[in-house]
Image (cartoon, rainbow, N blue to C red):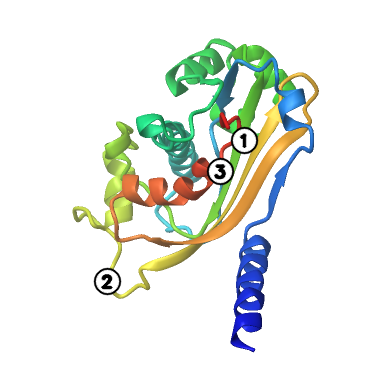
Amino acid sequence: MKKIMQPLILISIVFLLNCCTPFFISHDFDIQTSNHQTVAILPFEMKYTGIIPEELNEEDLMIIEEAESVAFMTSYYNEVLRSTKSGKKPIRVDIQHYKKTMQLLNDNKISILNSWNMKSEDLAQILQVDAVLKGYIEKNQLIPDLESFGIDVGIHILNIMTDNSLWPWIPFSLTKSKEVNTNYSLVNGQDGIILWSIAYKIEADWRSPADQIIDDVNRRSSKKFPYRIK
């Protein structure tokens, strides 16, 4: 009986993991991407569901959203490359550097917020790539201190969010773990077809440094990034 139960338990665990992590990859992914050479990671779309501090105005929130968007994009770029460290699970395409992506968007007068609503195939053409990676992050905590990514949101915003104190700015009276909903999609630049996607929920420790929080959120998905050389 024990020998029979063990495989059943294992199957149940695998089923639960798959249910908790919706995953899709095109059945002919290798065929559709056989000519792909370069992929760009787009600025992530951010959605905030928490309580907004009264002192923050619309302009302040836009600054934070754009800063977080770039931070998540930067982190994902680094995490994908890190997942191939020491020749482990190498990928067969180049990942366009995020600075080039941002420069091309700026040159074409496309703001970060506007890029969220544009067609993927249009962005791929502008960025001169074969496919784009779109990320969506839904959370209930703002991350104003992004100095670790070289991003300055301004003393005014930082003072509001930290209550004029230094990092760590999350009060210890709050629960440190907050749920973050994520979704990542790789979109074909030629026709806008989704080639690969993954979505999951993760508990983030908001009393950790900003770069650690963001890297932790991105790491699981980046390890599943396709184009791996078998």
- The answer to whether any part of residue 118 appears in the image is no
- Which amino acid is tagged 1? Lys
Q: Is residue 39 left or right of residue 74?
A: right
Instruction: Name the residue at 30% across, 61% down.
Output: 207
Q: What number is the disc on residue 76? A: none
| Residue farthest bottom in this picture | 1
At which x and y percent is residue 47? Answer: 57, 50
| Residue farthest left in this picture | 166
At which x and y percent is residue 133? Answer: 61, 32
Name the foreground residue: 51 vs 216.
Answer: 216
Q: Is residue 202 left or right of residue 209?
A: right
- Which amino acid is tagged 2? Phe
Name the foreground residue: 211 vs 35.
Answer: 35
- Which amino acid is tagged 3? Lys
Q: Which residue is mark 3?
A: 224
Quadrant containing the N terminus in the rendered view = bottom right
- The answer to whether any part of residue 151 appears in the image is yes
Decide: few, some or many residues near mark 3? Use Cα within 10 Å; few <14, some 14-19, many ≥20. some
Give SS at disc 2. Answer: loop
Quadrant containing the C terminus in the rendered view = top right
Separation of marks 3 and 1 at Cα, in angstroms = 14 Å
Name the foreground residue: 228 vs 6.
Answer: 6
Q: Which residue is mark 1?
A: 134
